[in-house]
Image (spheres, grey):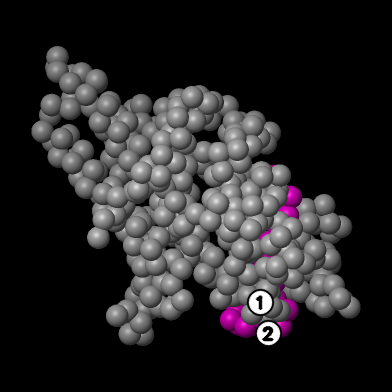
């Protein structure tokens, strides 16, 4: 099987690469990370003009009908450029949920706005005691005539400060840890009872804790009480996208480290001529290539209907890439010496982003545990 990108997919990456080189260099990125918004509104609209925001949506909703492979190609470039815009939250997670689970009317209303860049969303799925378990939901949803009222606290909602709407998981029936009784709701940012506590993330993005106090939901997404399966599948697709982003970062780290080894001199020669450092560089390259293979596996199986099969590949990739990205990041920092930790060098920012990716939607330990559970239950074929 040929795993190389097609000419069209390569052209998509090259287009984003030219944009990053021309308009989104590292100094520009540092300035954006310290700005009040935390990203570039102009760049967001450029993504819309390039069709990136419309990529994964059907053509009848203003999309381009792109496949998961095109999305993987884009996420690799998001990683290489350390892009701060809320592409993952708005397009991958929330856009994917609306595409797969919302009513026809809601898809017709929201997806064209996402594709045009006029709408941003954030996914509020975790709570303080959930520890990566999407089915641990204490927030309550109570029917009020034709409406639903939501109350509860959602934590670490990525890109929430700039979102126009939130997709919120809340319990309409059952106990806190029950797999049934979880529903998904669309909540408007300025709805009465919504409040945010915003803060920067380690990698320069933005997040917030979302408090809901008897908030009337804008709409119910999917069926009442049956949203957990849809949410878990969306999260698995999100994990596959994060794996691709991590691969893009590791490739960029390897390129930066190799360039440094060729130019930094000691004892009158480039340090890249030292055999011990060549071996470490070779190990970093092999690790990144293995991570790419795992990313491809996750991408190709993220849509699988069989939950055990899907989790086998997605959790396996997330666990492996979490460990591999730590290795590559640490080696890159060490091979750069003291320069590897300074804020003025991209290496430290790449490593921070790899750390954030590992902690998003379940860290390496969590997904190793999930793989172990599959083995013990004979779910691993």
> At numbered mark 1, what does the secondary structure look like: helix, strand or loop?
strand
Q: Is residue 179 magenta?
A: yes
Q: Residue furthest left?
A: 275
Where is residue 56? Give x, y as percent.
Answer: 54, 55
In the rendered image, the vertical position of residue 114 relative to residue 297, given as above or below? above
Which picture quadrant has residue 267?
Answer: top left
> At numbered mark 2, what does the secondary structure look like: helix, strand or loop?
loop
Question: What residue sits right under mark 2 in the picture?
Answer: 174
Query: Of label 2 and label 1, which has the lower sequence position?
Result: 2
Where is residue 366? Give x, y as percent.
Answer: 43, 66
- Quadrant placement of the N terminus: bottom left
Q: Which residues are magenta?
A: 162-182
Q: Please report contact status of discs 2 and 1: CB closer than 8 Å, yes or no.
A: yes
Q: Is residue 8 magenta?
A: no
Q: Residue furthest top?
A: 268
Question: What residue sits right under mark 1 in the picture?
Answer: 182
Q: Residue at x 46, y 76 (%)?
A: 305
* Most foreground residue, 59 or 115: 59
In the rendered image, the vertical position of residue 70 relative to residue 224, given as above or below? above
Q: Nearer the viewer, mark 2 or mark 1?
A: 1
Q: Residue at x 44, y 66 (%)?
A: 302
């Amino acid at each position: 099987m040929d795993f190389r990108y097609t000419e069209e997919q390569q052209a998509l990456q090259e287009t984003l690469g030219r944009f990053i080189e021309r308009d989104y260099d590292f100094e520009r990125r540092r300035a954006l990370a310290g700005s009040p918004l935390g990203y570039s509104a102009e760049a967001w609209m450029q993504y819309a003009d390039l069709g990136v925001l419309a990529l994964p949506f059907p053509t009848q909703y203003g999309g381009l009908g792109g496949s998961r492979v095109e999305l993987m190609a884009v996420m690799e470039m998001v990683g290489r450029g350390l892009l701060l815009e809320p592409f993952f939250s708005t397009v991958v997670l929330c856009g994917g949920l609306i595409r797969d689970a919302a009513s026809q009317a809601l898809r017709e209303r929201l997806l064209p706005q996402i594709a045009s860049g006029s709408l941003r969303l954030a996914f509020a799925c975790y709570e303080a005691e959930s520890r990566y378990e999407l089915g641990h939901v204490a927030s309550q949803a109570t029917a009020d005539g034709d409406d639903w009222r939501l109350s509860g606290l959602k934590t670490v909602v990525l890109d929430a400060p700039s979102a126009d709407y939130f997709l919120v998981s809340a319990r309409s029936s059952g106990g806190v840890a029950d797999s049934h009784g979880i529903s998904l709701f669309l909540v408007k940012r300025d709805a009465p009872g919504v409040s945010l506590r915003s803060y920067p993330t380690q990698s320069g993005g933005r997040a917030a804790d979302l408090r809901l106090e008897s908030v009337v939901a804008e709409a119910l997404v999917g069926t009442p009480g049956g949203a957990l399966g849809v949410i878990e599948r969306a999260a698995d697709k999100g994990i596959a996208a994060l794996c691709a982003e991590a691969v893009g970062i590791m490739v960029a780290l390897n390129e930066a480290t190799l360039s440094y080894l060729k130019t930094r001199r000691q004892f009158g020669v480039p340090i890249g001529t030292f055999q011990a450092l060549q071996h470490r560089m070779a190990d970093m390259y092999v690790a990144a290539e293995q991570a790419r293979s795992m990313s491809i596996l996750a991408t190709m199986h993220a849509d699988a209907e069989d939950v055990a099969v899907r989790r086998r590949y997605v959790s396996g990739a997330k666990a492996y890439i979490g460990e591999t990205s730590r290795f590559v990041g640490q080696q890159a920092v060490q091979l750069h010496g003291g320069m590897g930790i300074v804020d003025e060098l991209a290496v430290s920012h790449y490593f921070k982003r790899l750390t954030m990716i590992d902690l998003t939607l379940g860290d390496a330990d969590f997904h190793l545990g999930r793989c172990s559970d599959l083995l013990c239950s004979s779910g691993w074929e």
